[in-house]
Image: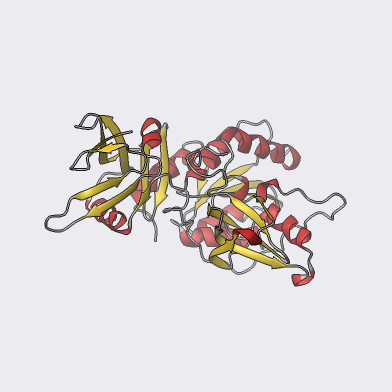
Amino acid sequence: MGTFHDTKDPLHGITVIAETAGTVYVGRCHSRDAAEIELLDVDLHEEGQDDKTHAQWLDRAARFGVWTKHDRLVLPAGDVTSLRPLSDHVRAPGAAPVAAPAAAVAATTEKPAPESGGNAPVTLTDAARAEVARLIAAEDKPGTGLRLAVAGGGCSGLVYKVEFDTPTDNDVRFGVDDFEVVMDRKSSIYLRDVILDYQGGLGGRGFQFQNPNASNTCGCGESFSL
Amino acid sequence: MPYPEEMVAPMRAELTQAGVRELRTPEQVDDFFSDRSTTALVLVNSVCGCAAGSARPGLKLALENTNKPATVATVFAGQDLEATARARELFGDVPPSSPSMALMKDGELVHFVPRHLIEGQDANTIARELAAAFDQFCA
């Protein structure tokens, strides 16, 4: 699959068609397991709705995309008979070409792409996001992002690094709320599925990494091994 | 809420340094579209990884094609909200997504690349498909 989702389910972050009995859903796949499938920015079509068959509706969706009706929908996995990328949809042979859209209509307001926690290899808690946003507002360095990295050292072998830095062409980059998170590719492997939290206030420990892949973590939480 | 400008500056520069005209106001969008007698491509830019890894580099590669639009511009979704909204008005009845690309000819949308055809694709694939559209509509 694509460049930025290789640490997740192959359909994570991909716009998919989810077919159930009578209803077809198109949305961005956020997560799926044996019990349920979570979709974001979802539109749906009932057979015959707007005088269109599912196939006709999907033909247009495949060409132009869909209008979001639901920010998030969770479908019981048992109800979904087919789940596949919208980009794989092929117009049925003999089907009429999808007409070009009508001329200018009223503008729609931009719905921000919910990258935070959606397509990201690293998840930031609400506290971490708020603290990063606060720090960024205090910074005055054009073009910087939040760099997360792993380096050798510490009592367990590897240490986490958090800093503001300028992204490079070789970085893995993704947007979270109002800022960009960057990682060098080697670090992105070690940081797969990591959760970055922030514990502030008196006695707070600052930024904390929760790494499900770590086999050993030192007492301070700053060093780990895999 | 827009990202801090200093954070998106490199995302803008990647395109403007490649000769893509940036449209930051509705007036600039209207001015760009005022000439309906030619071909024009508009990239709806975005902060997301699909734009960084696929859409922007893909467009830059595609612009090396022999056939290409007479003019190329970009609006920045989530950053220049009014300009993006105005551009989307002019694309027609197309759901908003970003990144995305609209190829116009004689003032009409003739080819559209929505986000779902960019996500998961590498830049070379995006470039090849854009070049094919350029060959079809810009020759």
Expressed as whole percent of the image width and height from the top left, the position of residue B63 reads: 60, 35
Please tell me which residue is depicted at 79% across the width and 64% down the height of the picture. Answer: A53
Please say if A153 is above or below B39: above
**Left/right of residue A149 with respect to residue A16 in the rendered view:** left
Depth order, front residue of B130/A64:
A64
**Left/right of residue A117 with respect to residue B90 in the rendered view:** left
Expressed as whole percent of the image width and height from the top left, the position of residue B42 reads: 59, 49
Please say if B90 is above or below A165: below
Q: Quadrant of residue A217?
A: top left
Q: Quadrant of residue A70?
A: bottom right
Depth order, front residue of A124/A137:
A124
Q: Quadrant of residue A209?
A: top left
Depth order, front residue of A172/B126:
A172
Tally of numbered discs: 0
Quadrant of image for the C terminus of chain A? top left
Expressed as whole percent of the image width and height from the top left, the position of residue B73 reads: 55, 47
Please tell me which residue is depicted at 60% across the width and 32% down the height of the picture. Answer: B124
Quadrant of image for the N terminus of chain A? top right
Residue A43 can be seen, yes or no:
yes
Expressed as whole percent of the image width and height from the top left, the position of residue B16 reads: 47, 41
Please say if A5 is above or below A94: above
Q: Looking at this rendering, what residue extends furthest in the left direction? A: A202
Scheme of colours in the image: secondary structure
Q: Looking at this rendering, what residue extends furthest in the right direction? A: A94
Residue A108 can be seen, yes or no:
no
**Left/right of residue A47 with respect to residue B92 in the rendered view:** right
Please tell me which residue is depicted at 62% across the width and 38% down the height of the picture. Answer: B126
